[in-house]
Amino acid sequence: DTLWAGGPACLATPETHCPKAPALGLSHRTRAGPPGRALPYEAIPRSGRSAWLNLYRFWRSDGFQRFHLLMERSFQRYGPIYRCAALHGAAQGRGAGGEGARGCSSLPAGQSSELPTVGTYNSVNVLLPRDAAQLFQSEGIFPRRMGLESWIAHRQLRNHKCGIFLLRAAGSLSCPPHPRNGEEWRSDRLVLNKEVISPAGTRKFLPFLDAVARDFVSLMQRRISKNARRSLTIDLYGDLFRFTLEASSYALYGERLGLLEESPDAESQRFIGAVETMLRTTLPLLFVPPGLVRWANARLWREHMAAWDTIFSHADRCIQHIYQEFCLGQQRKYSGIMAELLLQAELPLDSIKANIIEFTAGGVDTTAMPLLFTLFELARNPGVQAALRQEIAEAEAQGPRELSKVLNSMPLLKGALKETLRLYPVGITVQRYPTKDVVLQNYCVPAGTLCQVGLYAMGRSPQVFTNPERYDPGRWLSQEDNSFKALAFGFGARQCIGRRLAETEMMLFLMHVLRNFRIDTVSKADIKTVFGFILMPEKPPLLTFRPLY
């Protein structure tokens, strides 16, 4: 998983073709069948019959932007599990009864379980934490999830390697999985873990993130000083995008882009423009095979390819700079994650570049959006904002310490980020293909079936959270069992490898912003959200910053 890997795969409308399920509750699984005997896969409540018809309806109703709401409505209608016909650009090789499904398949021996329509397959969607736990226990040592075909197609056409995010993506007709991908993914992941997600690796890049967070505060202070009212009301998303790109690039490449300065240089402008274009063009490519796009919308495809080419060229220049520093024989100091990987030489150069680029692509808007939602919730919950400010003051009152220790002494701030991601998960699902048959809600789900945990629906379900509509970071500090309730970064071997980078970047940003500004909002009404590759506000909130000193 990555923080942004949870795009929906199910193109299903809320119309039902089976009896309506009982009201959602923990006793739901006891409704059918004799005790101790799992029901067959075909008995799972089903939403929709034809993926292609669903796709047409979605295009007509702009349903792609309402994926999260439709999934939530489906859970309310069918209960904590349902299945649907799905479509994702090109066909997945097998449907629900794929290889290893002998224990669950209700088909006669020898009968193929492949779905008859090219481009479609079945998806099983679950809501409750206990089913998420059961699913993750069945993922095997080489977990798989859905991939982004347009990204993979670029790597193939340009003869670039894939990083670990794309290596374990499920195959399709245009991008079949390679049998060695699991082994390569695992070996690369173990090397990357040491520099990106381990406590020792995290401590090394924290000062880089801290420096950029301080610069963001200085930027806001300069803007406020030019305003006679000593305040600033602004749509902050563009600035947050630049902050997250500046911070992640500094930690990854060891170089500042200057995006928080008044006039960034032309090279930095090209790079940020390429990242913006790549993300913008990815959304319309999610549901259409790359080969079809190249024929139907050549301009869109050229823009997407050119954006990736610019991003790869930027990485090449950074690698050249790092090697030049090595050759000069200067005193060794920490110069970012890529420099450490190059120095250790445990991964081939093309693998290092591929993974650093994937970190870049996955660490910008996926961090900017949670920060925007957090600032909005703090603005309309001044009591929570004051409590966080008090916690920050108490942490700093303990005197100079390592940044990691400062962050570890702010559990409420960590809870605030969890609470934001509960209500506004960047990826609205977490996906797995179980490697063995698994029983979910007393239904037998065959190995190889695409299974999705509905994060948006779970986070707002009263069956999972008390007062789910309330923004309450303290709920994560209670003695309540919160196992498998906070899955925005995934879980297990495939949890988001950029998790520590994202978490610490957001915590340092909020720490410096809250200790310098009081934040208000023009409107405290709920934000309407849309799915646009990630979950985002339909209209960004206007936030007001007032200096505390």
Image (spheres, grey):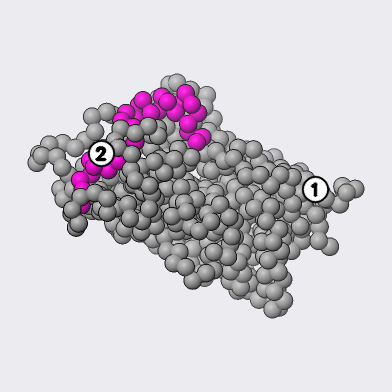
Q: Which residue is mark 2?
A: 95
Label 1 neighbour load within 10 Å: few <14, some 14-19, many 20+? many
Residue 311 spot, x, y in % from top left = 55, 42
Callout 2: few (<14), some (14-19), or many (20+) C-alpha neighbours within 10 Å?
many
Instruction: Tell me which residue sits at (69%, 47%) in the image.
Output: 524
Q: Which residue is at 50% across, 58% downward?
A: 466
In the rendered image, the residue lying farthest to the right is: 228
Residue found at x 44% / y 67%: 481
Q: Is residue 375 magenta?
A: no
The residue nearer to you, when weighing 8 against 77, is 77
Q: Give the CA separation, mark 1 to mark 2.
A: 54 Å
User: From what the image shows, is residue 387 above or below residue 452?
Assistant: below
Q: Secondary structure at mark 2?
A: loop
Q: Position of residue 402 (x, y in %)?
A: 63, 74
User: In the rendered image of this protein, does residue 98 appear above or below residue 520?
Assistant: above
- Farthest-out residue, left: 109
The amino acid type, in three-letter code, at marker 2 is Gly
Question: Where does the C terminus fall, quadrant-wise?
Answer: bottom right
Identify the residue shown where x is 47% and y is 23%.
60
Q: Nearer the viewer, residue 54 or 128?
A: 128
Q: Which element is circle 1 on?
A: strand
Q: Position of residue 2 (x, y in %)?
A: 46, 51
Q: In this picture, which residue range is highlighted in magenta?
A: 38-66
Q: Amino acid at mark 1?
A: Leu
Q: Is residue 48 in the magenta section?
A: yes
Say how many tags the image has: 2
Q: Quadrant of residue 262?
A: top right
Predominant secondary structure, magenta span: helix
Q: Is residue 35 visible?
A: yes
Q: Is residue 173 left or right of residue 347?
A: left
Q: Residue tagged by mark 1?
A: 232
